[in-house]
Amino acid sequence: MARLALLSVSNKTGLIELARSLVEEFDFELISSGGTAQALKNAGLPVKKVADYTGSPEILGGRVKTLHPRIHGGILARRSIPQDMTDLADNQIRPIDLVVVNLYPFEETIAKPDVTLAEAIEQIDIGGPAMLRAAAKNFADVTVLCDPSQYDEYLQELRQHTEPSLEFRQKCALQGFLHTSSYDQAIASYLARTQPTQTLPEKFTVSGKQLQSLRYGENPHQKAAWYQTGVNPTGWAAASKLQGKELSYNNLVDLEAARRIITEFTDSPAATIIKHTNPCGTAQGDTIAAAYQKAFNADPVSAFGGIVALNRPIDVATAGELTKTFLECVVAPGCEEDAKAILAAKSKVRVLTLPDFSSGPKETVKAIAGGFLVQDADDIVADTSRWQIVTERQPTPTQLAELLFAWKVCKHVKSNAIVVSSDRTTLGVGAGQMNRVGSVKIALEQAGEKAKGAVLASDGFFPFDDSVKTAAAAGIIAIVQPGGSLRDQDSIQAANELGLVMIFTGIRHFLH
């Protein structure tokens, strides 16, 4: 008797070619449902509709088609167990050797901006996951294909071995379970977002498809891979690489840090240069070339081998500046054609375009032994109207704008974080020190004489007044910090005595 294959797919890529090979090369009989059956019929291929095979019509507007003993019995029957085969014979059920199923486009549906809950619900597949799970469970006897990329390998297995090897069937089963797991996770995540709650879900899962195998992780002895979440590419998965070597694990980590910081600046051209996830130079300018030059000059030593993010397309002038030093990566919303030709002179530099810098994760996940931690992304927008001026001296509009710039940058520096800035340019950055005054000293030492008349931002409160006094001694004229220390009054008093402006934001931006 001819082998039986069940085909029911939403993504019809490669369907006709696969089905034709099954019929003409390997004498399969085909059963199918809905649009898949019609596509096969239109291609002139012999196919029996599931409703005709089961003797039960599709009901509930197509919600129930394949949920039938003749389908699931044929998939789940264990060929090596006599009673299973007797049950099939007694119920006139044929064994199904191949199940080709992929699911309703749920993720594509919810990616639409105006999708309704009702529309999303109708794209929750029921029969498809049931068949995938059944076929994957019975991989000892059944092959399950859930992705068009598997079709050619399956046909090669048939050509070489008459039937697929057990190893191949088990590999396909794993892909089937991963497919249904990812699908269920997308549904659960979507429904969780529709709930009127401010808390994170009781169960949190992360699912992704491997986009690229990376050479290694943070270090050569660590394996690494890049995964895409969701069906539709977003974020870095949607970026275009114009030139350069393959992206590394560390490149991607630094690029994400660069994306987060450059997103803070939309009203004027801005540039940031990242090293080990910290900004060594960030600046705003009248043009994108000017912004980059200011960011580079903030710390030209650290900028060597850095990651550059620009919030405006790369023009000829900026491209010329970018080629003057060694850089690992450059990312911008776009790149002019003449600028591409200039950048090509540095062919190893990875140049990417990312049209949407603002699209980022809503939560951050950090692995720990025995589990992981989840938190909301720190995407709160600074609002100066909510800031509290706690000193006798009031900031000028220019000083307030500078404090806002420094505060935005400081948010993206590893704690303990201190940023000194002037003329919308970072002059000194103190990152990741074990005590705050240590970060203050590093930032002020880097700024040097330029600290005179500059402002200082701190991601956390000052537990003592020593940082205020150190800043004033270097020439700092204004400070922005969260406030909230038991000894805030000591810092306020020191600022008043030294003639500084000090502002409390009421918001802390620790970054570990």
Image: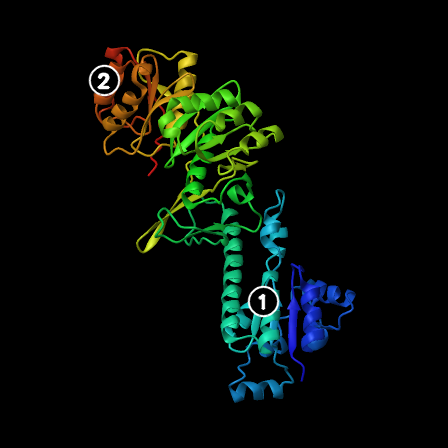
Residue 129 vertical position relative to residue 286 in the rendered view, above or below: below
**Side of 45 relative to 224 (left or right):** right
Locate residue 157, reporting x and y percent.
58, 72
Among the two numbered marks 1 and 2 on one chain, the one whose residue lies closer to the N terminus: 1
- Residue at 47% across / 29% down in the picture? 264
The type of residue carrying mark 2 is: Lys
- Residue at 49% across / 43% down in the picture? 245
Residue 177 vertical position relative to residue 380 in the rendered view, above or below: below
- Residue picked out by circle 1: 153
- Residue picked out by circle 2: 469
Q: Which color scheme did the rendering employ for the protein?
A: rainbow
The type of residue carrying mark 1 is: Glu
Q: Nearer the viewer, residue 258 or 196?
A: 258
Q: Helix, strand or loop at disc 1?
A: helix
Residue 67, quarter of picture: bottom right
Q: Nearer the viewer, mark 1 or mark 2?
A: 1
Report the label total.
2
How far apart marks 1 and 2 lie (CA) works out to 70 Å
Residue 430, quarter of picture: top left
Q: Is residue 27 visible?
A: yes
Q: Is residue 199 visible?
A: no
Residue neighbourhood size for the residue with mark 1, other residues' Cα within 10 Å, grouped as few (<14), some (14–19), many (≥20): few
Residue 117 vertical position relative to residue 503 in the rendered view, above or below: below
- Residue at 31% across / 56% down in the picture? 370
Label of residue 191 in the image: none
Q: Nearer the viewer, residue 187 or 320?
A: 320
